[in-house]
Image (cartoon, helix red, strand yellow):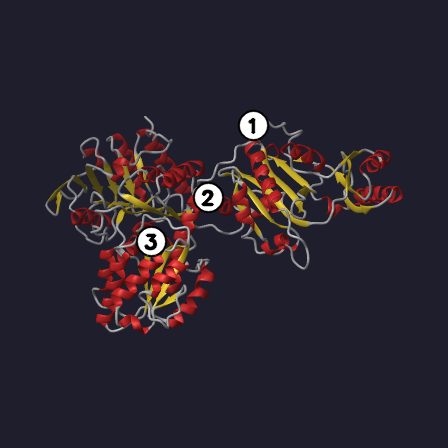
Amino acid sequence: MSVASSPRGGVPVGRLLRPQSIAIVGVSEDQGTIGARALGALERFGYGGRIHLVNPKRSEINGRPCVRSVDDLPPGVDVVMLAIPQVATVEAVQACARRGVGAAVVFTSGFSETGEEGIRQQQVMTEVARDAGLALLGPNCYGLVNFVDGIPLTSGPVRPNPANHRPGLAVLSQSGGMMGCLMEAAEARGIPLSYAVSTGNEAVVQIEDFLEEMVDDPHIRTIAMFAEQLRQPRRFLELAGRARALGKPIILLHSGRSERSREAARSHTGAMASDFTTMRTLVTGEAVLVVDDIEQVIDTAELLTAYSQRPTKGLAIITDSGAFKGLSLDFCETAGVDIPNLSKATVDALAEVMPEFADLSNPLDLTAQVMRDMSGMYGGSIRAMSADSGVGSILVCLLMGAPHVVKAKLTAVCTAARGVDTPVVVLMLGGDSPLPEDAYNITREAGVPFFRSAGRALAAIGQMTRYGNLLKYADRAMTVALRAIRPLPRPGLLPEYLGKSWLAQTGVPIPAGALAKNIDNALAVACGIGYPVVLKAQSADLPHKSDAGGVIIGIHDPAALRAAWDKMTADLARACPGLVLDGILVEKMGERGLELVVGARRDEQWGPVLMIGLGGIWIEVLKDVVFLPADCDEAGVLSALRTLKGAAMLDGVRGAPAVDVEAVARTVVRLGQLILAAPEVRELDINPLVAYPAGQGVQALDVLIVSQSEIH
């Protein structure tokens, strides 16, 4: 018997999350042991199912009977927690398989993370579990907690979450330590927790299995994830798309950002598209929020769990600090948060509650007059800002004061926040200075996120707004792949002339020219297309022609063409003895324009991504590039172009005209269509793609295509 599959091909985890019976193997009276702590957690949560204890040396523990071994358990126990040494684990899993156990949690480490012997033992455990239909969680994991039903399968010091009556946060982590950190941070911030899961080494059950279960769970509003490797990329993208469609945000912290690749890359795209970059590009296309650190995970989760609104507009700031009014503009620029100008209607509404001398702008300084009428000024300004069509969220920044002042401010702000549809976030300056005991209760009861750090508050608001905009982009009309394209003329790396011919079928402009076998052919081609021309040596064994003298530009007449032909053939003979050329490409020399690099790369696990960047120093030194999903649309490309460091070049600098960005966008979309329609393409680079002034289009001056058949 094999592990039953879920509808999407994974392992069902329902019995792990909602077991009717639980056994603990290795339990004792020593409260410092894993087994005793696991039992204590079940009792603390008031677990109402059947509990079985296994200890070969005891007949009872804490008044609960014990059996001597797994083989003595009643058949069909839902979950067995194995709190035993590593050396006994494989045998215990085999016993669980014999007894028809539904699922097991293996806390013990010392398996695939330790070396060859550990890998071998884990593989044995995997095979036993899969053959028996045993949903095994771990090894090397922290277990899980179902806060909704009050079921902890962990040895950690977990407590029932008092806020689990409303849709909350699910924490999914491959790391047990990270699960604990995020869970504790959520509890400290008063974020309602629905589930927390650690998958460890993922011998059988993987993080995608829990994601599938939780995407459809009505008790979950937001999912926070930590992963070191997503082992089922295509399934993850499918589930992320479903979560997006259901309005359920996924916040992902993923390690492994270093620029590295499993295989050598021939192109700029291949060299720059690390595994992490590819993953981030494609999951972001499904509106997954990839964040940079642990604080951003929990801060962003708090906002997205507190509010069902998904703002896309800018931030309004209300403060009683004139200094923060100025500083916040700098903070927001760093955080990428837009501070919109207020509409006339908003200014008029503010004038009714603000003193005459106040500057009615965004950020809004309430001045010291707010102390005279907190309810009127905080409430009136929040309501006025909320009604502004350019405002997507509101940050209220408060100065500290006496305990009664702090509570009065928070009460006024939270009362107003409950009455508007715009997400409101409260920031109280003063760092970690103590607050009145019930200050946090005021914001928690109102469901208003409360921060003590301006940087963290603004970063979280930025992520919340980014999520709203990702939803808009992900709901775009998906690009349809080309239905019929010519097959590649040959496997492996295509010489430029073949690559250009194949690329041209999508409508990407290429220079006029043809392949010449000898100088007479070359002269005839040049005469037909007109001077000046360029010569380029053509061979699959010469991907970087310039390095070997295989490119000569600026040839203006027949005599210069003869001299260039002789020089190139001589240089190539010296640099690459024995090189066999298909011929030499003679092309019309292109006009000057803005050079860009456009490419595509297919990751074996994740699929294709596109890259676009400015050429020259921008890519060679600054690596000024941006990545997009292969099914992007023109609006997405145009938006991505504006994120480049050198984006001003597109608009023309030092007298240069603005370039035809619409033609650039069309070319990128066509490249995406091509790689979607041709799964054999591994890398495709246009370098450079020259963009001409607005309305004059683009031209692909050099093309490199590598098919997957070269690798396999």
Which is nearer the N-term, disc 2 or disc 1?
A: 2
Residues marked 2 and 3 touching at CB (< 8 Å): no
x and y, in percent, of residue 67 in the image: 16, 38
Q: Amino acid at mark 3?
A: Thr
x and y, in percent, of residue 606 in the image: 49, 39
Which is nearer the N-term, disc 1 or disc 3?
A: 3
Classify residue 115 by image quadrant: top left
Q: How far, Cα to Cα, is label 2 from label 1?
A: 24 Å
Q: Which mark is residue 422?
A: 3
Q: Amino acid at mark 2?
A: Tyr
Q: How far, Cα to Cα, is label 1 from label 3?
A: 45 Å
Depth check: give the residue in front, 249 or 119.
249
In the rendered image, which residue does mark 1 sit on? 483
Residues marked 2 and 1 touching at CB (< 8 Å): no
- Answer yes or no: is residue 667 visible: yes
In the rendered image, which residue does mark 2 sit on? 473
**Image depth: mark 2 or mark 3 in front:** 3
